[in-house]
Amino acid sequence: MSIETFETAFRLVLAKEGGYVNDPYDSGGETKYGISKKAYPHLDIKNLTLQQAKEIYYRDYWIPSKADKLPDQLAIMHFDTAVNTGVKTANKILQKALNRQGFDLQVDGIIGPKTLNAIKNANLSKLLADYTIERNRYYAKVGNSRYIKGWINRSISVYDFVNKYSAVALLGIAVGLLTFYLLKKGV
């Protein structure tokens, strides 16, 4: 897992979360870059800097969700879910998605050795699809009619993003290998 993957995930979250808002219907209250006053009552949300938001996301979401221990595509998806639903809920969504592949994990929201081992043995493409299904099931269960359409659209757009991310990464590797081969051959 590289810092570049965190940077990519962070930029994706920023694109979804946007800047400063104070939606009276949002229980999080005042929010900037997705960081809410409810979650961080000690912060001056209106004057929160991008760097401060990045540090919060890394410390309070990336590391606790174990995104740093996941394959890149899954890490990006899981981090976005952790930001949107909370770390423990995102972890449960991941465990439910793994159980769709026949793993018998306790859905406790704790990403430990058993969950990490299941991830290593899972079909990643299927896991990304199953994760999206479980994420959308969670949103349907929450049933907030004001936000559900946006949440589901976000979930699907993240799924689309990580699938394209994989293709771009593989293309970059292929171009690099071809270039190395051609240079070695003197072409």
Image (tube, grey):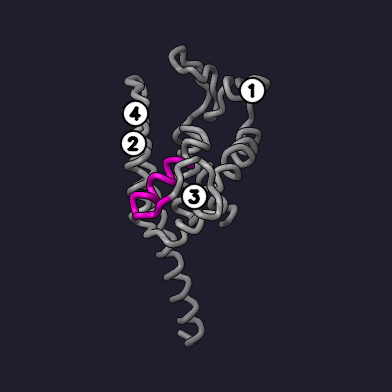
Q: Is residue 68 left or right of residue 78?
A: right
Split into 4 quadrants, where in the image is the C terminus? bottom left
Q: In this rendered view, identify the residue nearer to me: 70 or 172.
A: 70
Q: Nearer the viewer, mark 3 or mark 1?
A: 3
CB within 8 Å, label 4 to label 3: no
Instruction: Determine which residue is flagged by label 3.
Output: 75
Q: Give the image location of residue 92, x and y in percent.
A: 45, 40
Q: Is residue 143 magenta?
A: no
Instruction: Determine which residue is flagged by label 2.
Output: 136
Q: Nearer the viewer, mark 2 or mark 3?
A: 2
> How would you classify the magenta stretch by its main secondary structure?
helix
Residue type at the position of mark 4: Lys
Instruction: Determine which residue is flagged by label 1.
Output: 47
CB within 8 Å, label 4 to label 1: no
Rendered residue at 44%/49% (across/down): 105
Q: Quadrant of residue 156?
A: top left
Q: What stretch of residues is rendered in magenta?
A: 91-104
Rendered residue at 39%/44% (across/down): 96
Q: Earlier in the sequence, mark 3 or mark 1?
A: 1
Mark 1 burial class by Cα count in 10 Å: few <14, some 14-19, many 20+: few
Q: Earlier in the sequence, mark 2 or mark 3?
A: 3
Instruction: Determine which residue is flagged by label 4.
Output: 141
Mark 2 burial class by Cα count in 10 Å: few <14, some 14-19, many 20+: many
Q: Earlier in the sequence, mark 1 or mark 2?
A: 1
Q: Quadrant of residue 77?
A: top left
